[in-house]
Amino acid sequence: MNISIIGTGYVGLVTGVCLAKKGHKVICVDKIQSVVDSINNGITPIYEKNLNEFLIDVLGDKLEATTDIKYAVENSEISIIAVGTPFTEGKIDLEYVKEAAYDIGMVLKEKKDYHVVCVKSTVIPTTTDTIVLNILEVASGKKLGEFGLVMNPEFLREGNAVEDFMNPDRIIIGTIDDTSFDVFSKIYKDYFSAPIIRTNTRTAEMIKYATNALLATLISFSNEIAAVSEEIGDIDAVEFLEGVHMDRRLSVNIDGKLIKPDIVKYLKPGRGFGGSCFPKDVKSIISFSESLGYVPRILKSVIEVNDFQTERLLNLLKEKIGELNSKSITVLGLSFKPGTDDIRESQSIKLIKSLQEKGALIKCYDPVAIENAKKELKDYSNIEYFDIYKDALVNADAAVIMTDWDVISSIGYDEFKKLMNNPVVIDGCRIFDKKEAQSNDINYVGIGCR
């Protein structure tokens, strides 16, 4: 099929490249000329595993990029809106979605062929069937039926987005009418083996929010119960949560072998969640719920617990090295998770800002996110950036593990001892074995154990 993708961020570019890889013809649209030029030159403007290789493979024959939305919509059967929906001024900002819908609608005014518009951006329930539909009808002068409209949420994990798109566990298509579903579902039929689940648009929108809210809740639950165990003493949250994982309702025993599903990975103590989805989506559904007159108490607590994780890390540092003023602190990992250069809502960035305010001298290392971090922290002083982790560890008074990149989890205990002033390691990801680290004379403490 011929498909146009409006917006080339993480979701839009991954969607476009992967659909092209599956054999569809794709036109990616972005307003920023430098982004379009980069894509057309075979260079992805974002870091995502396998994405650049896939782009080079499909470029020209199956995929092109442009700033001309009119050209893209006219030359496609389906337009997928994949623009950002930031959380600003206490609520989700739908400005970019509205703008994309209007621009598409203006092209549809003159287009004779039936065209399906898909909302893939994460939007609060009621957005597609009220706001987007109304804008499309007003801009195009047509009614639903003369064009199609669906909501197709994404379930992509940054760092594994290409793998997740190419091998989905489910495909949700929210529709209002049969024709929209029949046409849009052709994108996936015969190309993907995952079950296609049809819902209404509001249910599709809610599935996305419920999924992210559940995973964020598991993370905050783990950190809350880990904080309790720290206060009790002589309990390691990693150990007791491993015991929780073995519950037959969480893990399955097949022929004597325990099979752990991915969801138990979220039941682990750590520095908390970040990124472009969990914080924004949980806050957005809280705000929307409150606008309807209901206070979502659990979800509010999820954010509150997550926000407190930076303070917990600072307290662990103070316990180990005293006052932080003029102390040299190495932060290992800047992206909010491994496999991406995304620093949005990164707990690392929050920690660095807090450390800087307390007068610490900060050294940073990350294999891919340095440049993004520099932009975010441009107004902060006493920060050094390193492309080699060993250089970042030299003469440090403490090291804080904030992203569980393989290169960081592979650092040897002897390197900490050799390079640092005092081998104090605060493990915000719990990637090192506590007993092993301590037996190697590392002054180690992790979230969930003291």
Image (cartoon, rainbow, N blue to C red):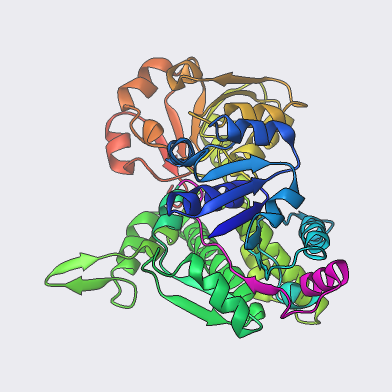
Label count reads 0
What is the quadrant of residue 322 in the picture?
Answer: top right
Relative to 378, is 418 on the left or the right?
left
Q: Is 91 located above or below residue 368 in the figure?
A: below
Q: Is residue 435 magenta?
A: no
Q: Nearer the viewer, residue 114 or 403?
A: 114
Q: Position of residue 284 (x, y in %)?
A: 72, 65
Q: Which region of the structure is painted magenta? A: 131-159
Instruction: Note whether residue 275 is visible.
Output: no
Q: Position of residue 8 (x, y in %)?
A: 64, 46
Q: Position of residue 76 (x, y in %)?
A: 63, 57
Q: Residue at x 80, y 69 (%)?
A: 136
Q: Is 230 located above or below residue 66 in the figure?
A: below
Relative to 222, is 122 on the left or the right?
right
Q: Nearer the viewer, residue 36 or 403?
A: 36
Q: Residue at x 62, y 26 (%)?
A: 371
Furthest residue toward front: 112
Relative to 293, is 439 on the left or the right?
left
Q: Position of residue 348 (x, y in %)?
A: 59, 39
Q: Residue at x 37, y 62 (%)?
A: 262
What is the quadrant of residue 167 in the picture?
Answer: bottom left
Q: Residue at x 39, y 70 (%)?
A: 194
Q: Nearer the viewer, residue 377 or 171?
A: 171
Instruction: Note whether residue 22 is visible.
Output: yes
Q: Is residue 158 magenta?
A: yes
